[in-house]
Amino acid sequence: MRLIQVLIPEGSRQPVLDVLEGQGIDYAVFEETGRGEFEAMVQFPVPPTGVEPVLEDIRAAGISESAYTIVLPTETVVSERLDALKALYPGDRLSREELKASAQSLAPELATYFAFIVLSTVIATGGLLLDSAATIIGAMVVAPLMGPAITASAGSVLADRDLTARGIALQVAGLVLAIVVAAAVGAVLKGTVIIPPGTDIRTIPQVAERTSPGFLSLFIAFGSGIAGAISVSRGSGSTLVGVAIAVALIPPAATSGLGIAWGYSGVAASAAVLVLVNLLSINLSALAIFWLSGYRPELSEQRDSVRASVLKRGAVLVVALVGLSIILGATTFAAYQTTTFENQATAETEQFFDDPAFSEYQLEAIEVDYDSQDIILGNDPTVSVVVGQPNAADVPPDIAERLERQIEQRTGQDAGVRVGVIIGQESEPIPPTVDATTSARIERPHPNGAAAPDFKRNENSGRSITLRSSVPP
């Protein structure tokens, strides 16, 4: 319920009371003894959905915006007399006036806003480098990005250009600042002992997660925007929903900044695309929810122009998202291809060594080197296999070639295959001076032109055995 208090100007008391009596609303009137231009104050309870139509009728009765109208949320109202009023105004949607007030309060002062952006970005950057999801989520509690997104959309449907412009400006400035701060933090940490030399941020799971945006990113962003709009329009849970919106924006912005700091243009660009996609999706979904919830400008002559403006803005957002979706589609398809190949190559390798001809082999490890960047650059995948075998003399010289043919027949994909064979003896301990080495390989350059990694295995049960297998450049 809401408690509305209205100061009635001189000569307007009876028209206002007639409006309330006509809708069956109980009210109390107090004589005004303050400024002489008001003759009384009336207060009355009304459900949230009734605030907007009742205030419209009161304004039509002679109460202008120059007077004072106060809308107060109430904790509890005990009265059976309100049942009829609740049936007349069902639901819990906030009024136009309350939505506008909430949107204004969600867009904080510049100093506060930018301070929280900097702090949340610093924490999120640390969480990315530490690969800590908990730290990243904690940083989002600080991030104030829900306010500007909701403010821009609310201003659009209510024909408040200042509110719209402020929301858009705060979003753009905040995300640009987040990228700059993350880049600065990354550049500083990169040159210290805090970050080990040679650290490749592309291998950090929390960073890699935000450098391959797919269509699921759209669902996350749309869900965040819808949740934010619903929470504000219903007056519930806006703080927690703000965390979801911040999660969709600050971590990819920080990832883009880290890509700049490390000089990885691909990381910076792909994370920036994710930021832009999420930003557009959140704004589009919030705009749609507010419009479908029935929010319109107070003045009827503004409604046609606002409808055209909302449709135009929505069309621009949709076109931009469709264009960016091409990138998301390519990334999603590449991720599907790499995952499919990895699963097929792993299954074929396991099946290959399950053959009775290789019954003495023990499959130790399978590693598939193939990602979205390899597809974009046209690099072939590499399959690295480590197996155990008790006798070096029994290792076929073409084992890697045979496995390669089987994988290519199954997947239709050219692949470089490396097989490392660990030779062990179990009957008696091997003298420490003995070094048994064998290698089976396929003469094919590594897709990235680099030497293949060494396979090493040391046992402490009386023997020391080392295997090195490499593909020549």
Image: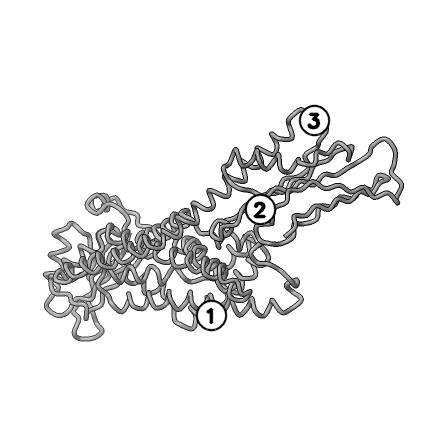
| Residues tagged 2 and 1 counted as in contact (Cβ below 8 A) | no
- Secondary structure under tag 1 reads helix
Residue 208, position as x, y percentages in the image: 52, 53
Q: Looking at numbered disc 3 in the image, what kind of residue is underneath it?
A: Ser
Which numbered disc covers residue 425?
none
Closer to the camera in the image, 196 or 74: 196
Q: Quadrant of residue 427?
A: top right
**What type is the residue that disc 1 sits on?**
Ala
Is any part of residue 74 visible from this angle? Answer: no
Report, in whole angstroms, how far the alpha carbon at label 2 lies from the one at label 1.
Answer: 42 Å
Q: Count numbered badges in the picture.
A: 3
- Which residue bears the numbered disc 1? 115
Of residues 408 and 265, the one nearer the viewer is 408
Rendered location of residue 454, percent (x, y): 70, 48
Q: Badge 3 is on which residue?
A: 359
In the image, taking residue 230 as reference, residue 23 lies left or right, namely left
Residue at 28% across, 65% down: 164
Label 3 crowd bin: few (<14), some (14–19), many (20+), radius 10 Å: few
> Could you say which is closer to the camera, residue 77 or residue 309?
309
> Of label 3 and label 2, which has the lower sequence position?
3
- Decide which of 204, 336 is in the foreground and name it: 336
Say whether residue 135 is visible. yes
Mark 2 sits on what residue? 369
